[in-house]
Image: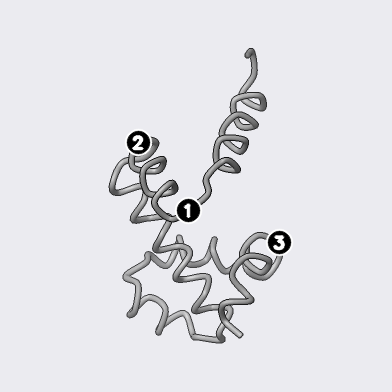
Amino acid sequence: MSSNKEYTEELYNAILKLKSTEDCKAFFEDLCTYREIDQMAQRVVSAKLLLKGETYENVIKQTDVSSATLSRVSKCVKYGNGYKKFLSEETE
């Protein structure tokens, strides 16, 4: 491997092999620090709340996410595809 793009593809391919919550937990505990996992989880919950129509103020109260991170999550909810595709069914 010679490029970051190839490394990223390796990561995505490894994630696609995960079959269960237990698989995900084991893999991400090896891959990330506790704080990194916590921050990703915080972003997912924040996105779900935004998709439900919660205000920034309520999301910050419920998740303790920073306003800068919430702003980025909000942009992704509005203009991205991932959060809407993978979280919107759960919010309906």
**First in sequence: mark 2 or mark 3?**
2
Going by the picture, which residue comes out furthest to the top? 2
**Which amino acid type is shown beneath numbered disc 3?**
Asn
**Which amino acid type is shown beneath numbered disc 2?**
Asp
What crowding class fits label 3: few (fewer than 14 Cα within 10 Å), some (14-19), or many (20 or more)?
few
Displayed quadrant of residue 66: bottom left
Displayed quadrant of residue 77: bottom right
Label at residue 81: 3
**Which amino acid type is shown beneath numbered disc 1?**
Ser
The foreground one among 71 and 15 is 15
Q: Which residue is mark 1?
A: 20
How far apart are the two marked residues, 2 and 3, measured between alpha carbons? Answer: 27 Å
- For mark 2, give the secondary structure: helix
How far apart are the two marked residues, 1 and 3, measured between alpha carbons? Answer: 23 Å
Displayed quadrant of residue 75: bottom right
- Relative vertical location of residue 2 with respect to residue 42 in this rendering, above or below: above
Of discs 1 and 3, which sits in the foreground? 1
Number of disc labels: 3
Label at residue 65: none
The quadrant the C terminus occupies is: bottom right
**First in sequence: mark 1 or mark 2?**
1
Give the residue drawn at x 59%, y 25%.
7
How far apart are the two marked residues, 1 and 2, measured between alpha carbons? Answer: 16 Å
- Image coordinates of residue 33 in percent, x first then y, are 31, 41
- For mark 1, give the secondary structure: loop
